[in-house]
Image (cartoon, helix red, strand yellow):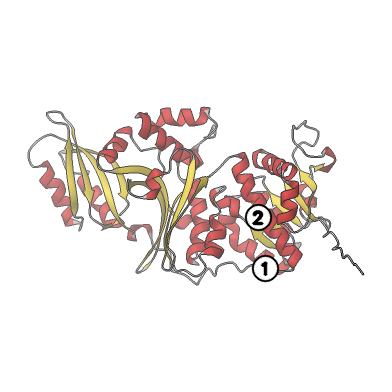
Amino acid sequence: MNSTSTHPTPAPIRVAVIGLGTVGGGLAEIFATHATQLTARAAGPLTLVGVAVRDAARQRDLPVDPALLTTDAAALAVRPDVDIVVELMGGLEPARTLVLAALHAGKAVVTANKAIVARYGAEFVAAAAAGGGQLYYEAAAAGAVPIVKVVRESLSGNRIDSLLGIVNGTCNFILTQMTNSGAAFADALAEAQALGYAEADPTSDVGGEDAAYKLCLLARLAFDADVQIDDIACEGIDTVRAEDIARADSLGYAIKLLAVAQRRETGLEVGVYPTLVPKSHPLAAVHDAFNAVFIDGDSAGPVMLYGQGAGRRPTASAVVADVVDAALALRSGAAARPEPSPHGGPVVLPSADGLNRYYVATRVADQPGVLAAIAGAMAARGVSIESCVQDGRNHDPVDLIFVTHTVRDGDLRAALDDIIKLPTVRSVAAVMRVLK
């Protein structure tokens, strides 16, 4: 006697999206083009049940049923027939309020909004614990690079000692253009804007704020540390000069905007700043708008993840991965994933207590005794010079370029304050860290 058995089709996991801009549109396209694949990977169907937009009457060339559109995001976030809320509107408010409401209502929440997770992460964890919700934010950290999952899961058996990231594609594209063509910063920025890599107002990107938000999330995960956005020393690339890039190249370095979290004996150093990276280091070979994160764990050793850091499809890809993870957790009844303890890791060091090597470019009078005076000012503050190069002769001023040994950041800054007061020093033109 033959018998057959069938398994009932799982009920759909119902997804609501708040925001149908660049990333939201990419999400809708992936849902439409990869429906069969997503059903298999999510152990059952995913169904879009609502999309909150500013203007429901506007015509959109997207695979979204107009009947799903609503302008009432607050109601959509807590609707009983919604299992997963995807927040893609950006900004601090009302995004924060909507995410809190959804978590209190027991929803799984997926967001690509780095700013709200960095600033209000503790509130979200408390809301999720109170309401039974869960927060997913892979796309907020490094676009399509699955760094959150790797740190949270794949490297869970490691004590992470350092995390170095190129996490802003706009800055990396600009620095690549300056390196390849010798272009000035303003010209490279204009090209990035023309190609859509940079916003009309690029301040958050080129000033380092975007990378600082991402570092805040990653440092909390990697080090179980209570890192707040205001703890992160932040320097952008808008002061990087073409001549510094050329000099760095001649010295064997590439200049990159790095997000750095480094375990020291006394705590955790965190910061975002342009850095001279040795050409032998894997991060030096990350070009154009790509992102990469380099992690050193005590068991795994060095690990690097590389990929697209921004854009419609790459960011939407990371959002969809979180939606699938959330759907699997809902179907299995898995307990909420614990967030790192904000008090389980190292304390965050004041920025003055960082330990780094430095590249210092000064413009000085071309006369005897200048080098000795600068070296003396540095020595008085405990700064040791590793190398010095003079660029130009019989001009006034000429450039003196120093690379220091490892020094406490506060001592280097104090030495620079003394140096600029020397009568033969015209200016300190550039100061950048040098990766060991």
Residue type of the residue flagged with mark 2: Asp
Identify residue for label 1.
336
Camera-nearest residue between 137 and 101: 137
Identify residue for label 2.
322
Residue type of the residue flagged with mark 1: Ala
Q: Residue 362's spot in the image, x, y percent? A: 22, 40
Q: Residue furthest front?
A: 1
Camera-nearest residue between 82 and 44: 44
Q: Secondary structure at mark 1?
A: loop
Camera-nearest residue between 209 and 302: 302
First in sequence, mark 1 or 2: give its number: 2
Question: Can you see residue 339?
Answer: yes
Q: Residue 78's spot in the image, x, y percent? A: 78, 56
Q: Secondary structure at mark 2?
A: helix
Q: Residues within 10 Å of mark 2 (few under 14, many from 20)?
A: many
Q: Residues within 10 Å of mark 1 (few under 14, many from 20)?
A: some
- Up-down relation of residue 400 to residue 183 (above or below): below
Q: CA distance from mark 1 to mark 2?
A: 14 Å
**Residue sitting at x 81%, y 43%:** 70
- Up-down relation of residue 380 to residue 185 (above or below): below
**Residue sitting at x 65%, y 55%:** 322
Q: Residue 401's spot in the image, x, y percent? A: 21, 41
Lateral position of residue 145 relative to residue 418, left or right: right
Nearest to the eye among marks 1 and 2: give it.
Answer: 2
- Up-down relation of residue 271 to residue 4 (above or below): above
Q: Which corner quadrant of the image does residue 271 belong to? A: bottom left
Camera-nearest residue between 33 and 375: 33
Q: Residue 251's spot in the image, x, y percent? A: 25, 42
Lateral position of residue 286 relative to residue 121, left or right: left
**Residue sitting at x 54%, y 60%:** 150
